[in-house]
Image (tube, rainbow, N blue to C red):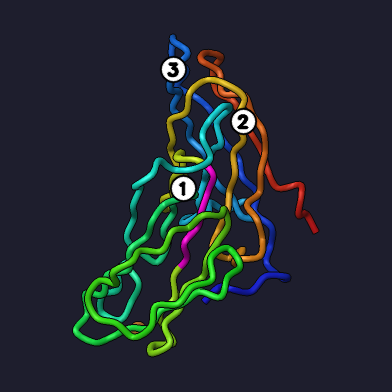
Amino acid sequence: MPQTKSSRPPLLTEALLGLACAQAIAAPLSVTVLDANGSPLPDAVVSIEVAGGKPTAAPGTQAEMGQRDRSFVPTLLVVQTGTAVSFPNFDTIRHHIYSFSSTKPFEIKLYAGTPAAPVVFDKAGTAILGCNIHDRMTAFIHVVNTPHFAITNKAGVATLEVPAGDHTVQAWHPQMGDKQPPQRQGFKAQAAGGPRVIRLGSASKP
Ligand SMILES: [Cu+2]
């Protein structure tokens, strides 16, 4: 799996902010993530920290990372900091899952069904998951300090709704692994004003 770093090209992210609305409420934001060659990048996580937003999820926020047919489902899960993630095993065989990532080291030893206690992801970052029994099983849990996030589609586009204001957009891709933080850039989401382009990526240019 794409856990390696160094030689990977940096991501370039470009956000097109359009569809201005008349009132200072939610503005649809379309973000296109491009790789270093300018090609659209599917399966990238785009998250937006809005001005004055709460970084931590409301108590009781839950998500699920299942195991089915000896695979994690989904292979990429995005959650807000503070989310409790459960790990139900839908297979008839047992799994033994773990993460060594500093964002959330944990282990759930050989089990069937749903483990009693979910794992709370209390720090932003990325956890790479594995299974001790099935080497090929791997997945990512990407944790962000905002409820505003989306994964890019085949065209490399993610669509989010955010209120007008000064925000920070972040982009991360599984190729960046669990050591590299998302690329970030501030931008102003305006209630009106037409299309707008935001470009990220200078931080890690070779
Ligand atoms: Cu397994």
Coordinates of residue 166 in the picture (x, y in percent): 62, 25
* Quadrant occupied by the C terminus: bottom right
Mark 3 and mark 1 residues within 8 Å of each other at the beta carbon: no
> Mark 3 = which residue?
25
Whichever of labels 3 and 1 marks the residue nearer the N terminus, that label is: 3
Q: At which x and y percent is residue 176?
A: 61, 63
Residue type, numbered disc 3: Ile
Identify the disc placed on residue 197. Answer: 2
The stretch of residues the image draws in magenta is: 140-145
* Residue 55 appears left or right of 4: left
For residue 102, side relative to residue 113 (left or right): right
Asked whether residue 65 is in view, the answer is no
Question: As shown in the figure, which amino acid type bears the numbered disc 2?
Answer: Val
Above or below: residue 17 compared with residue 152: above
Q: For disc 1, does the CB lie below 8 Å from ligand 1?
A: no
Depicted 98 relative to depicted 75: above or below: below
Query: Amino acid under label 1?
Result: Gln
* Disc 3 from disc 2: Cα separation: 20 Å
Q: Residue at 41% across / 79% down in the picture?
A: 97
Mark 3 or mark 2: name the one nearer the start of the chain. 3
Q: Residue at x 46, y 62 (%)?
A: 141
Of pointers 1 and 2, the one earlier in the residue sequence: 1
Asked if residue 151 lies left or right of residue 113, the reply is right
- Picture coordinates of residue 204 (x, y %)? 76, 54
The residue where tag 1 is placed is 80
Q: Residue furthest right?
A: 206
Quadrant position of ligand 1: bottom left
Ligand 1 neighbours mark 3 (CB distance < 8 Å): no
